[in-house]
Amino acid sequence: MRYIEDILSMAVTREIEAYEFYKQVGEKVSDKEVKKIFKELSDEELGHRDFLEKLKLEPVMLTKIEPPKADYKVAEATELPPLSINMKPADAIALAMKKEQQAVELYRLMAESINDDSVKESFLNLANMELNHKHRLENIFVDIGYPESF
């Protein structure tokens, strides 16, 4: 159980870092829509942090994280845009989904390096949580970056 608590503490730290990143970007960009997007993302990261803190009290909840039904790998096929105070909304979402992709990859790499099956499962469940975040952002990115035109 101690491993799980350590994993969750590390995950909480990553969510706080993501919150700080999104908050700072949101404060620096000039586009109002991008500001709104990063404000929402920073608020979501606080929610993720709170969820992970609850998992410390009830680690069994960690096994209930299901991945999205499909991963279309939009983030993997999209280049990381440069951070700029003049970012367009699509670039802001691309940046956020790439960050989530990196989190998924980190947790999967950690899972691969562990021999303890319960710890491995914890990392894979955290990867699923981040994969769900990535999936949501990819859907937003596709809606913003590729609007239908008639």
Image (cartoon, helix red, strand yellow):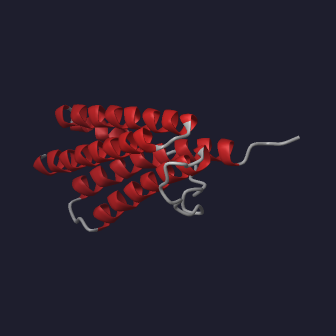
**Taking 19 as reference, is 36 above or below it?**
above
Residue at x 40%, y 34% (from the top left corner) = 44
> Where's residue 48, x and y in %?
34, 36
Q: Nearer the viewer, residue 109 or 35?
A: 35
Does residue 66 show up?
no
Instruction: Please report the residue visible at 13 percent of the width from the left and 46 percent of the height from the top.
Output: 1
Residue located 22% across and 34% down the image: 53
Q: Is residue 42 left or right of residue 145?
A: left
The answer to whether 50 appears left or right of 99 in the picture is left
The image quadrant where one finds the C terminus is: top right
> Can residue 128 be seen in the rendering of this structure?
yes
- Seen as rendered, the residue at the extreme left is 2
Measured as percent of width and height from the top left, residue 75 is found at 55, 57
Which of these two is toward me, 125 or 118?
125
- Of 54 and 13, the residue lying toward us: 13
Foreground residue among 58 and 105: 105
Residue 61, horizontal then vertical, whole percent: 29, 35
Q: Quadrant of residue 129?
A: top left
Farthest residue, direction right: 150
Q: How many marks?
A: 0
